[in-house]
Amino acid sequence: MNNKYDTILIATKNKGKIKEFENMFKSFNINIKTLYNYDLPEIEETGNSFFENALIKAKAGYDISNLPTISDDSGLEVEALNWKPGIHSARFGKRSFNDQDRMFYLLEKLKGKKNRNARFKTSLVFYNGENQINKFEGIWKGIILKEPIGNNGFGYDPIFYDENLKLSAAQLSPDEKKLVSHRGKALKLFFEKFKSMI
Ligand code: ITT
């Protein structure tokens, strides 16, 4: 496919997200760069919403690369925790925590709670300079399991259960996850728009 976007920056350092983006872009003839290609200090996510943080990351990525940039700010909202951790999902608990520690910290917080309702949310921003900001959003509803199941995906996937599929997010293949996930839905909307731009 000939198009004017031969290279796009995905403004992230999250390896789980990068895999999902690469999977979505594989049928397009577009080179993908990530923040691993640039020497950029950690971007401070000072926004009050997924969209604000996504825009901060997209602008920072565009400024350093001068490339059309996609960013994703996402997180898990849990009803019994007043819909937290939300925009703080990547920093839930202690700063030293890894993905697995955060998952067990969340399970600990939900111990004994009957209401396990949760949802993943993504705000995806495509930024190509001041006057070109496009926003795409996705939600994935599910419940939080009592213990992790499955080895795929990243982050909170092993404890997030899709009641329709009767599987945890970590039991889904990348192709299955993209059909139902918050990021998959936002990316589908992005590609619908993108096809008309290339
Ligand atoms: P970047 O800012 O570099 O993109 P990050 O991990 O800090 O990476 P976010 O600020 O958007 O990204 O935080 C999202 C967190 O929400 C992520 O670290 C996971 O813990 C969780 N999360 C988001 N999408 C997820 C998914 O599809 N599966 C499991 N956990 C997810």
Image (spheres, helix red, strand yellow):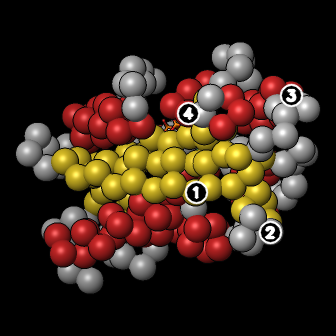
x then y, percent, for residue 118: 66, 45
Q: Whole-Å distance between the Cαs marked 4 and 2?
A: 24 Å
- Give the crowd class for mark 2: few <14, some 14-19, many >=20 residues within 10 Å: few
Whether tag 3 and tag 4 are in contact, CB under 8 A, the answer is no
Instruction: Provide the residue designation for mark 4.
Output: 86
Whether tag 1 and tag 3 are in contact, CB under 8 A, the answer is no
Q: Which mark is residue 166?
A: 2
Image quadrant, ligand 1: top right
Sequence-wise first label, 1 or 3: 3
Element marked by disc 1:
strand
In the image, what residue type sits under mark 2? Lys
Element marked by disc 4:
helix
Instruction: Provide the residue designation for mark 3.
Output: 108
- Give the crowd class for mark 3: few <14, some 14-19, many >=20 residues within 10 Å: few
Query: Does residue 70 show up?
Result: no
Q: Quadrant of residue 84?
A: top right
